[in-house]
Amino acid sequence: MTPLRVTYDAEANAAYIYLTEDPKVLSAWMYPCDPVAVDGMINLDFDESGRLIGVEVLGARSKLPAHLLDSAERLDRC
């Protein structure tokens, strides 16, 4: 099993967890989770077949483990 690819932008405090290895798979639609129920903003991305392909987490520092964000690919660094 290949490790999950996770990207993180500390300035935006946003992370994305990729659930597919295929870079050609694009999001066909997004389902926003209830921000009140999850105490934040989490968006689920699905492909055209309805398969979950990624999870966007806004307010990532309060939602995800620090070790996951520390090991994530950083988008806010050049």
Image: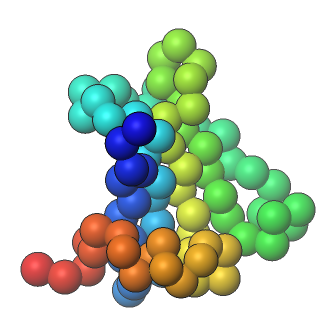
User: Measured from the top left, where is residue 27 in percent x and y?
Assistant: 43, 32
| Residue placed furthest toward the right | 37
User: Measured from the top left, where is residue 50 in percent x and y?
Assistant: 59, 19
Q: Relative to 25, say whether 57 is above or below.
A: below
| Residue placed furthest toward the front | 1
Q: Relative to 11, say whether 5 is above or below.
A: above
In the rendered image, which quarter is residue 59 located in? Answer: bottom right
* Residue 29 shows up from this direction: no
In the rendered image, which quarter is residue 62 located in? Answer: bottom right
| Residue placed furthest toward the left | 78
User: Measured from the top left, where is residue 53 in percent x and y?
Assistant: 49, 35
Q: Nearer the viewer, residue 70 or 47?
A: 70
| Residue placed furthest toward the top | 49
The residue under the point 41% across, 50% down is 4
Is residue 33 found left or right of 78 in the rendered image? right
The residue under the point 53% across, 56% down is 56
User: Measured from the top left, where is residue 15 in percent x and y?
Assistant: 46, 66
Is residue 5 found left or right of 54 in the rendered image? left
In the rendered image, which quarter is residue 69 located in? Answer: bottom left
Q: Nearer the viewer, residue 72 or 53?
A: 72
Q: Relative to 2, say whether 66 is above or below.
A: below
The residue under the point 57% across, 63% down is 57
Q: Relative to 33, say whether 75 is above or below.
A: below
Count of marks placed on residues: 0
Q: Quadrant of the C terminus?
A: bottom left
* Residue 17 shows up from this direction: yes
Q: Quadrant of the N terminus?
A: top left
Is residue 8 found left or right of 60 in the rendered image? left
The residue under the point 61% across, 73% down is 64
